[in-house]
Amino acid sequence: MSNSIWPKSSPQRVAKALEAHSIIALALGGLIYILAVTGTLSVFNHEFQRWEQPNVAEMTSISPKAAAAAARTVFESEEVPTTHLYINFPQPDLPRTVITTDTQAFFAEPDGTIGPRESFPWTEFLLDLHYYLHLPQILGLTVVGALGAFLIAMSISGFMAHPRIFRDAFTFRRGSGRVPMTDLHNRLSVWTAPFHISNALTGAVLGLASVLAFTIASVSFAGDIDRVFDPVFGAEPASVDGNAQLAEIAAPITHMQQNFPDLLPTFFILHDPGTAGQHSTIVAEHSDRLIFGEYYNFDAAGAYQGNVGISDGTIGQQIIGSVYNIHFGNWGGLSVKLAYLVFGLALCVIIASGMRVYFIRRREKGRAAPRLEAGWQAVAWGTPTILAFILFISMSGIVTGIGLVILFWVGLFVIFVTSLSMANVERVRRLLQASLIFFLLGSVCAHAVRFPDSVFTVATGQVSLALTITALFLTTLKFRDHRNNREYRDAPSDQTTPPVR
Amino acid sequence: MWLLAVAWLGIFISLMLWSVTSGADKGAALGIIAVILAVTPFIFAASLLTAPRQERPISNRSQAPVTKARTVYLRNVWVGMLIGPLSGLAALAMSTLVFTGLRVFGVDHSMNLAVVSIAFPSFWAALAVFAGYEPRLLHKSAWVIGSGMLSGVYLIISSLGV
């Protein structure tokens, strides 16, 4: 017997680690899967925003004067004074200028006039689902953050159950049975570990920040949560009573262009506009860094007051400033976004294949659970299907806002219950896949009917093409499965059950 | 074995080069992405090229519905509580304790916050894994609840200035 450099695995330890892995996956796999699917799509939220509202003025930049004029117009249209006035500057993936207040958002034209109201109901629905699972904000964030912690727990227990991880990293056993499914699950888990662990961790950090800050503030700062975050993101000066002329808007933007030409301003924020204590901030991206940006502060007259230190402050500030971008993949342009798409899909496959391994193992042990397995198929294929259905409905303009939320959860519930009663894994999967293809193509068609002038524009074309390619890819998979099943039926063999993928 | 060592060494060197050429933080991140992207297609391709799986005939072992005693259900509910909310509360108390401790030692506030922001979900994950891994119910209950209680009691006492 040859000596191996790899550690000996204790069967008991592996079994206990697998037990922990299975408990968490069975209890929370469905919700984590929904977050994985929505998170993968959320990476492209800017592209979806453009697709949902294609007939809007686009620009690579806007002049400080035009941006200020647009902001002033929106501010003056407010019935109730807003506490913050925002200008979202054009970005490479969202080349539009948006003026936002506490209650409304309008596009700005390049000449500083106001365009249509911002409206992207499906993207908003998608982001709310990923950020909060449609729960009230703090509760939703905390639940989503907790699910991030459980995804880390699954990674830890998965690694514990796989002691020869470095040796097996380069192997993939082909063949039949549970083995290739297990290998797919394990190899993808190992190779994409840097992504899914960092993503779960950053998601958990973002989601659990409120609860942690509340506890730290209660123990160390007499309940003052601002004292927890102010040293990182900078303190907001106390508001001052009394009205004033609206603060200078063009001057800070001009200052950034002249003094920081290498930076990409993303937001202008006017705090307490129209009051004696108003002051402004410009958030600007540093293209060579992972941080989401740096805060550059100005007084009401537009005089530069300094930066907060996300880019050049303490290490702690820079780490915290990098969490958001690492999670959402918006730090390296389209190429990094596409990489996040691949990794996000890999995470979905990891979760789905893990559950498949569990059900196959149950069948092999004579404890088949066809209803439960069909229920899992309802979640695995039902989630993208119902998302595509919501996209179709949203594009038709029949339902918006809370209606989409109700449709999603009721729809998913109905699919789940129906699948449980059908107890036929293959049939459930085939039906849901066909529905997904139908709604993807239906959404593209509905979009073309609603926005016929925008079919061949960049804003529309890239997403429509991606949705069509996805539908065609799924159709190919369906035909492949159909062919395999037919070959099996035609083959004179002694096999007793049809092939399953 | 040598081939594996060379492969891992190659990956390590590649990450270092990315880090040197494209910035300390962003370069390393880009390097990791490049390595994963290089491997993932092979795994997907191998999976897609795998022959369709034939289901094994269902085992002849007993398929009678398993009847579980009420105590088993109660145990499962308790384990769920340990893995979920109780591990979370314990992790929260432990993280807050770490923050308080590092503050006493004069660690910079932002760094302190960064450390405990990462520690909180990590503690939660570790306790959840332990609660699922450890077969002895009393043992895991004592560890999860004890770690939270000890941290919590210390925090309460210290915040009261006793």
Image (cartoon, rainbow, N blue to C red):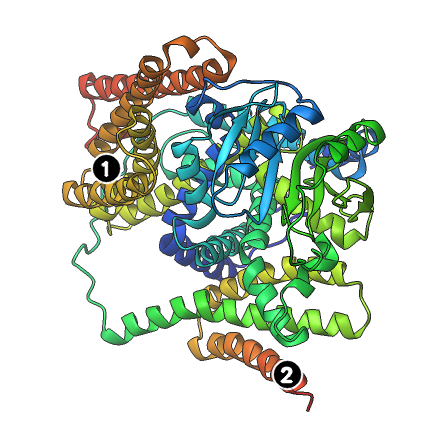
Viewer-nearest of discs 1 and 2: 2
Q: Residue at x 24, y 22 (%)?
A: A485
Side of A33 where B95 appears, left or right? right
Image quarter for residue B68? bottom left
Q: Residue at x 14, y 44 (%)?
A: A421
Residue A89 in picture, x, y percent from top left: 63, 29
Image quarter for residue A349? top left
Tag 1 near tag 2, CB within 8 Å: no
Task: Work out whether residue A496 or residue A245 is closer to the camera in this orientation and state it.
Answer: A245
Which residue is tagged 2?
Answer: B154
Residue A258 in picture, x, y percent from top left: 83, 27
Please count the marks in the image: 2
Discs 1, 2: same chain: no
Q: Give the residue type at disc 1.
A: Val
Task: Work out whether residue B157 or residue A418 is closer to the camera in this orientation and state it.
Answer: B157
Residue A243 seen anywhere in this rendered image of the structure: yes
Side of A206 where A432 appears, left or right? left
- In the picture, the disc for residue A425 is 1
Q: Residue at x 45, y 57 (%)?
A: A143
Q: Residue at x 40, y 58 (%)?
A: A23
The subunit letter for the residue under badge 2 reads B
Badge 1: residue crowd in 10 Å (few <14, some 14–19, many ≥20): many
Task: Work out whether residue B93 or residue A377 is closer to the camera in this orientation and state it.
Answer: B93
Side of B22 where A83 appears, left or right? left
Q: Quadrant of the C terminus of chain A?
A: top left
